[in-house]
Amino acid sequence: MKLYQKIKNETLGKNFDIDHAYGNQCWDFVCYVFEHYYNGKRIHCGLTTYVQDFVTQKETNGILEFMDDIGLNTILEPGDVCVWGPCSAAPYSHVALYDSDNGSNQVYFLGQNQGETRVTVTQIDISGIIGVFRAKNMNSDHIDVGDELLAIGNKVKFDRYLTVEKIDLEKNWVYNSQIGGWVSASICTETSSADGACDQILYNGAQFTIDGTYTVGAISKQTDTVYINELGFWVNTYALTENQ
């Protein structure tokens, strides 16, 4: 499966608000893709607060660490990140992933906040695009990520956006249904600043991850869980990403 198809299959119809600010914006979805699929990071819009800064500040904002600036005249490939400046199609600028075209200026893009708050494939006029980036790990013939078919000995990482659903203050535990149970808060790293700062003070609704790379020691196909050697407990497979 090509990397873009994997992204599309896993995000289409979902909602992303990774910074818990201003709702489900185009920025949230694309930065989620950067972090989860393109070996990248969130790119902040410090100049105008709009995503046009991806292009206008590209020399200093870090996007070129994991993306190639392919210019406006390159034939687009699915998954290319396109950025609009302020225009009739995007009055405050916009960013989305190229999906496909029909031979006109009305091209299909995978993105969020393009008519709906969830991720959709929507036709948008390309005339306002001011920059296009392609992930360095993108290749039209293969994907540079794990195949997600876990086996004993595989190396895995935890999802960066697990959510605290319950807290046991006395034991210093947090509960997450995606992991499948309680874990010690001492091994969790807060990944959201929704409470004002990533201050390692977890609360109900806080987002966190468990940093590091871990080894699959056993597999249960019946329950779709794996045993993590280094942590000594079983985890639902959908809380994990196979490491490259």
Image: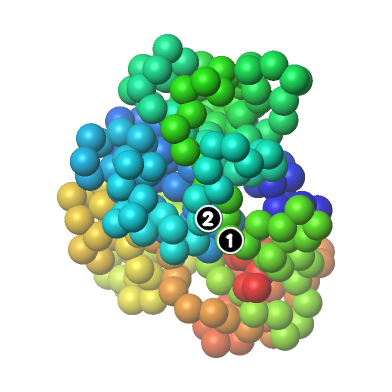
Give coordinates of residue 34: x percent, y percent: 50, 53
Q: Which of 230/27 is in front? A: 27
Find numbered disc 1 in the image and state the secondary structure of the residue it sits on. loop
Three-letter code, disc 2: Asp
Give coordinates of residue 57: x percent, y percent: 31, 47
User: Dot 1 corresponds to which residue?
Assistant: 136
Q: Residue 94, relative to residue 183: is it above or below?
A: above
Q: Which of 2/69 is in front? A: 69
Mark 2–mark 1 distance (CA, rounded to whole Å): 6 Å
Q: Residue at x 75, y 71 (%)?
A: 150
**Residue 46 seen from this side:** yes
**Residue 162 seen from this side:** no
Give coordinates of residue 70: x percent, y percent: 55, 48
Q: Which of 41/81 is in front? A: 81
Give coordinates of residue 200: x percent, y percent: 25, 66
Q: Residue 196, relative to residue 143: is it above or below?
A: above
Q: Do the residues bearing badges 2 and 1 touch, measured as CB atoms within 8 Å?
A: yes
Three-letter code, disc 1: Lys
| Other residues around mark 1 within 10 Å, as few (<14) / some (14–19) / many (≥20) | some
- Which callout, 2 or 1, points at the residue further toward the start of the chain? 2
Find numbered disc 2 in the image and state the secondary structure of the residue it sits on. strand
Where the C terminus falls, by quadrant?
bottom right
What is the number of the mark on residue 68? Answer: 2
Q: Residue at x 58, y 61 (%)?
A: 136
Q: Quadrant of residue 203?
A: bottom left
Q: Quadrant of residue 104?
A: top right
Q: Which residue is drawn at 70% across and 53% down?
A: 3
